[in-house]
Amino acid sequence: MIDSPTFELDERFRAAAAAEGLLDVAYDVFDDTAMGPLLVGVTDRGLCRISFDPNPERELEQLARVYGPRVLRSSRPVDRVHRELDEYLEGRRRSFDVDLDLRGQPNFYVRVLAELARVGYGETTTYGTLAARAGNPRAARAVGTVMNRNPVPIVLPCHRVVGANGSLTGYGGGLHRKELLLRLEGAIL
Amino acid sequence: MAVAVPPFETFYESHKTEVFRFLVSRIGRDRAEDAFQETFLRALRAYERLEHGEHLRAWALTIANRIVLDGARRQRPQGDMPDLVTEDGRPAYEELAPLTDDLPPKERAAVVLRYGYDLGYDEIGAALGSTEAAARQAASAGVRRLRKEQQ
C-alpha cells in the first residue's frame, strides 16, 4: 500500500520516541526463542517485565497501569536484555547484568524476590527455604504466589524453586518451561 | 466513567495509517514523513497529561493539522503546496483539504474534521480544546466563508 506509513518510517518513529526519553516502557517481542515468544519491557531504570503471554494486549494494559501509559514497542532499549537472554538460552551465560525496575511490588514480594536473586545457576531451593530466608518460615504458600507473579521470570530465577519433596510443583509460564530451564542449567537430567 | 487512556502502542497502531494519509493529502509524500514523526512525538509529549481516552482520533488528526499549519507558516515564502492528482473516488478529506487553505486555523480544522473526517461536533470540540457549540460555530463560519470565496 502506498498510503500507509512504511516499515522504515514506523521504525524511525519508534526509535526517536525512545531516544528522546519519551517512553514509560519500551518493549519488544522476541518471537523465536527456545522458550517460545517472550515479551520484554524496560523502563529508564531497568528491566521491568518478561512475559510468556503470546497475546500482549493484556500485558500492555498492565504495564501502562503500573509505569504510565507511554508504552511503545521499540527495539533499541531492549537490545541488551535480548542479547543476554539469547546467550543464557544458548548456555553461554550463567547470570544477568541488567538493572531491574520492581516499582509497584509489595514489600514482601521485594524481600522474597531479593532472596530469589541469590539462588545461583544450576542450584535449586524450596518454597519453604525461601520463605525462611525472607523472614517468615511459615509463608511457603505465599512464596509460591510471589513466584507465580514474578514480573521477570528467567532473570529472577523462580524456575529454581521446587517443592520440599523435589517435585517441580508449578511455573507461571507452564511446567514444560520450568523443566526446560532446569535441564539447560543441568539442575535435572 | 471516563474511558481510560490506552497504552500508547494501541493509540499509535489505531491511528497511524489515517494520520499518514491525512498528511500525504495535505503536504505530499516527502514532507509527510517528517510531519508524521513529529505528529506522534508531539502526541507522546502530551500523552501523560490526557485525562481520558475519548476523542483520540480527533486529537491525533488535530495535532497533525497543527503540524501542517506550523510548516506552512515557515514555508510560506516558497508557497510550495503539492499538486493533488484529481481522480475519481478519492476520500472526501482530499477533496476538501486544498479548498480550505485560506480559512483561519480553527475554522479550517473544524471544517476538515467535520466534513472531511466525519467527526461529531462533540469530538471536534474536545480535540480543539473547546466546546461542542464552539466547534459547530467554527465549522459553520468556515463553510460560510468558503461559499463567499467560491462566488
Image (cartoon, coloured by chain):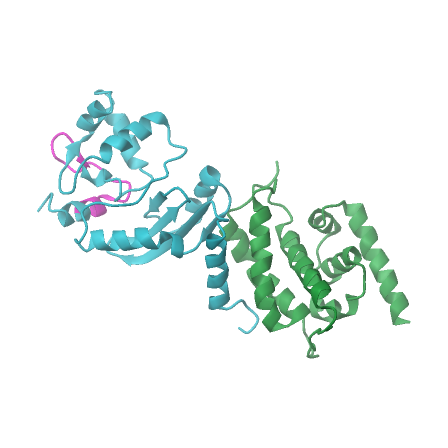
Chain colours: A cyan, B green
| Image quarter of residue B50 | top right
Position in image of residue B77 (x %, y %): 74, 71
Position in image of residue A22 (x %, y %): 50, 49
Q: Is residue A140 above or below residue B4?
A: above
At horizontal 23% and vertical 34% (from top left) the residue drawn is A116
Position in image of residue A37 (x %, y %): 31, 54
Position in image of residue A169 (x %, y %): 19, 36
- Front residue of B4/A10: it is A10
Q: Is residue B135 above or below residue B68?
A: above
Q: Is residue A135 above or below residue A104?
A: above
Q: Is residue A72 left or right of residue B128?
A: left
Q: Which residues are magenta?
A: A161-179
Q: Is residue A100 magenta?
A: no
**Furthest residue toward front:** B77
At horizontal 44% and vertical 46% (from top left) the residue drawn is A25
Q: Is residue A169 magenta?
A: yes
At horizontal 21% and vertical 20% (from top left) the residue drawn is A137
| Image quarter of residue A49 | top left
- Front residue of A32/A66: it is A66
Q: How many marks?
A: 0
Q: Is residue B29 above or below residue B139?
A: below
Q: Is residue A23 left or right of residue B132?
A: left
| Image quarter of residue B109 | bottom right
Instruction: Please identify the dominant SS of the magenta region.
Output: loop
- Front residue of B26/A39: it is B26
At horizontal 39% and vertical 56% (from top left) the residue drawn is A76
